[in-house]
Image (cartoon, grey):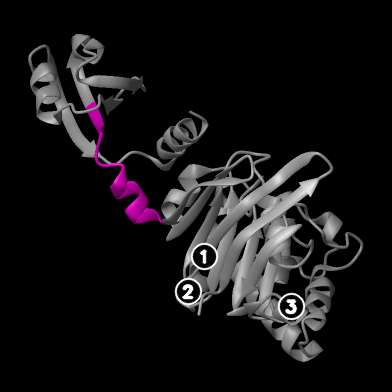
Amino acid sequence: MNTVELNKICKNYDEFVAVDHLSLVIQPGEVYGLLGPNGAGKTSTLRMMIGITVPDSGVVSMFGETFRRAHMQRLGYLPEERGLYKKMKVLEQLVFLGQLKGMSAHDATERSLEWCERLGLKEWTDKKVEELSKGMQQKAQFIGAVVHDPQFVVMDEPFSGLDPASAVVLKDAFLELKKAGKTLLFSTHRMDTAERLCDSICLINHGRAVLEGDLGKIRAGYGKRNVQMKYEGDARFLQDAKLVQSFNDYGNYVEVRLAAGADPQDLLKAATSCARLSKFELMEPSLEEIFIEAVGKANA
């Protein structure tokens, strides 16, 4: 059975349509990305999915059943906005959150300390939350979301505002949960993060699904129309509209989007006729490029 199924869910706030007939399927054990720009409807979708709000129409199913409150015991939720009690000490807070999910104080304490050790918070367990940096607060809130060993973990912009070192620590914890067989869902507007972590995705824009499904199949469907090149010399080959649809020059290398129907071998010949190449690599388009193209088609 699927972990989650959304069937044509809708959510309006007065005249504003936040989510518009959105459908998706999240399978057990996968990392699923809910992607799109700020304001696309990601948080509204997550809140309906886990019962914080109710869809105006459509059906939310979890663990093979229509969603009910009992499912909350089997999921963990990391909101985008930090919701910790600032005056409580870190360990007290985590134990309290574990007990809310049905854990004993003893088990909640043991698991909280284990996670604090993994995420580098062991020396801060006796500090008040307000004494922690933003990155450490995010780690503490992550622990609060997973301390009860949920089957399904939902995270809203989990990497937002983290420094690079903290982001790596959280990413490693994320992958540890995946290896343990958990189903993971996170929302983000960072396409590069999703590209590295997700098995499946739903790209949404203005509350509607633009693309949904297996990320590898989605990327393969767009073909290898990108070329990454390093060169020295004349770059006039980049101006050939029959070969090049667009390009981004980063100084030490250039990324080229091939024109429709163009043969990459013809681009290679044109480039070597006037420049010296040290790299010529045919690549699938990035997720960001796919999103831009898909949104363009949807709005056409």
Disc 3 marks which residue?
Answer: 68
Nearer the camera: disc 2 or disc 1? 1
Residues in magenta, as a range: 214-229
Looking at the rendered structure, the kind of residue marked 2 is: Gly
Left or right: residue 19 compared with residue 102: left
Judge whether residue 216 is colored magenta: yes
Disc 1 marks which residue?
Answer: 25
Residue 41 position within the rendered picture, expressed as x and y whole percent measured from the top left: 67, 46
- Residue at 77 percent across and 70 percent down: it is 125
* Residue 265 drawn above or below residue 9: above
Residue 169 position within the rendered picture, expressed as x and y whole percent measured from the top left: 55, 59
Crowd around label 1: few <14 · some 14–19 · many ≥20 (10 Å): some
Give how far apart the Cα atoms at labels 2 and 3 are.
21 Å
Residue 171 seen from this side: yes
* Residue 271 drawn above or below residue 70: above
Disc 2 marks which residue?
Answer: 29
Q: Relative to the observer, which residue lies in front, 296 or 256? A: 296
